[in-house]
């Protein structure tokens, strides 16, 4: 069965988000098809980013006419784009049902990264997150997830496949497992967007069943876990998901995922899972936290990515001062856990997840 990826007022079906097998089934019912028509259509959508059947001039005219009657290729509409002084670009997209989502383009000297949303709002309730304040509205379809990346790449005119993708925008990707994985396969397919799966990372708050399921996939994105506290009681306060899945359960699932990590036929033993740690002033930034992090991650193939909290007007948290952050880092650098420090990007354009959509919704 072909999963409906969105039908608009004209009754046409959106092809964006369908995988090759689905596209083959759509096209098999139409006039004027050739054996290679499905491959051509798939390539026009994901490799050439086509939005209209008119441009598909290597396909028979009767087929293009039939497609334009019953189908469409539609991406989220760009509502607003803001560029930071550090060149970070924040996109606000409007979906066909009027809901708003955000994506971010983060250019760096050595790499460029797209940060994509997977849900409208989020039900995980992390207390330091602007998206959590929106509540949960709905899951995104694979077309809406992939559509964000097509839009960004087209808008920037960027065609280099050496681009990083992080599912770290609005929403918890593992809470929308089917559509997330469909989007991942389209992004990673060499005949699709052709982005190396090694460059695609899923960030999760730690939905243990989702991580276990991911471990069974023949191909999966890399994993980043938003940790934010090494203490169960505190983590449960700031990230309610911890009440259901404790830190010990989370680390066990992560170790299981790493033990079965595949990339096609090749198992990669040297890969590490990233643990994200946002420093909140006076909450999770003491030397005791740093020492406990070292103890916790000693036996996990992990690297720790520290970042200072990006303040949001609607949340009562602050970033620690630079000297305090340095002292925290110093403790960790003395241990075996590899540590990196991620600078906050786009602070002048409300690039923290959910800020723009929340502002716009309030209006
Ligand atoms: S941090 Fe991520 S998982 Fe937590 S509420 Fe925000 S969007 Fe959801």
Image (tube, rainbow, N blue to C red):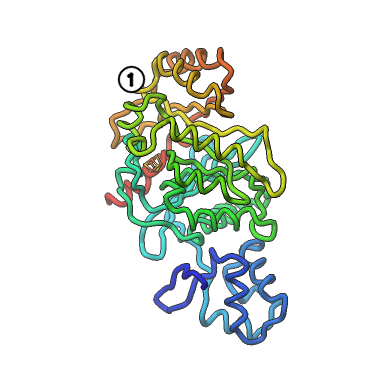
Which residue is at 50% across, 54% downward?
180
Instruction: Confirm or reject: label 1 Cβ below 8 Å from ligand 1.
Output: no
Vertical side of 48 occupied by 264: above or below: above
Which residue is at 44% across, 69% downward?
6
Vertical side of 146 occupied by 122: above or below: above
- Rendering coords of residue 136 (x, y %): 33, 51
- Rendering coords of residue 69 (x, y %): 52, 82
Element type at mark 1: loop
Which residue is at 36% across, 62% downward?
98
Q: Nearer the viewer, residue 176 or 254?
A: 254
Q: Quadrant of residue 131?
A: top left
- Rendering coords of residue 150 (x, y %): 57, 57
Q: How many marks?
A: 1
How busy is the neighbourhood of tag 1: few (under 14 within 10 Å), some, or many (20 plus)?
few
Side of 248 where 54 appears, left or right: right
Residue at the disc numbered 1: 282
- Rendering coords of residue 278 (x, y %): 43, 29
Q: Quadrant of residue 68?
A: bottom right
Quarter holding ligand 1: top left
Vertical side of 326 occupied by 16: above or below: below
Q: Nearer the viewer, residue 275 or 360?
A: 275
Q: Nearer the viewer, residue 220 or 136?
A: 220
Which residue is at 67% across, 34% downward?
269
Side of 354 where 88 appears, left or right: right
């Amino acid at each position: 069965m072909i999963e409906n990826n969105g039908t608009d007022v004209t009754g046409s079906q959106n092809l964006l988000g369908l995988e090759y097998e689905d596209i083959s089934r759509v096209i098999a019912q139409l006039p004027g098809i050739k054996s290679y028509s499905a491959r051509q259509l798939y390539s026009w959508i994901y490799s050439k980013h086509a939005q209209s059947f008119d441009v598909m001039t290597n396909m028979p005219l009767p087929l293009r006419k039939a497609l334009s009657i019953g189908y469409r290729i539609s991406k989220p509409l760009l509502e607003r784009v803001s560029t930071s002084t550090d060149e970070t670009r924040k996109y606000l997209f409007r979906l066909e049902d009027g809901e708003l989502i955000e994506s971010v383009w983060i250019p760096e000297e050595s790499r460029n990264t797209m940060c994509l949303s997977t849900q409208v709002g989020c039900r995980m309730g992390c207390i330091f997150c602007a998206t959590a304040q929106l509540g949960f509205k709905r899951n995104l379809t694979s077309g809406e997830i992939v559509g964000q990346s097509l839009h960004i790449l087209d808008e920037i005119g960027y065609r280099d496949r050496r681009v990083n993708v992080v599912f770290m925008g609005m929403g918890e990707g593992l809470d929308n497992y089917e559509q997330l994985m469909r989007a991942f396969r389209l992004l990673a397919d060499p005949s699709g967007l052709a982005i190396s799966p090694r460059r695609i990372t899923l960030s999760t708050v730690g939905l243990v069943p989702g991580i276990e399921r991911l471990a069974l996939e023949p191909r999966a994105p890399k994993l980043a876990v938003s940790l934010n506290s090494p203490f169960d009681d505190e983590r449960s306060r700031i990230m309610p998901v911890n009440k259901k899945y404790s830190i010990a359960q989370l680390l066990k699932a992560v170790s299981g995922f790493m033990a079965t990590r595949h990339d096609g036929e090749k198992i990669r033993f040297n890969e590490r899972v990233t643990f994200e740690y946002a420093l909140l002033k006076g909450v999770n930034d003491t030397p005791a936290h740093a020492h406990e992090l070292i103890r916790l991650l000693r036996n996990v193939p992990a690297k720790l990515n520290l970042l200072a909290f990006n303040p949001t007007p609607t949340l009562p948290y602050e970033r620690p001062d630079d000297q305090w952050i340095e002292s925290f880092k110093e403790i960790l650098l003395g241990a075996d856990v590899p540590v990196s420090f991620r600078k906050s990007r786009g602070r002048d354009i409300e690039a923290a997840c959910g800020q723009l959509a929340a502002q716009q919704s309030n209006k």
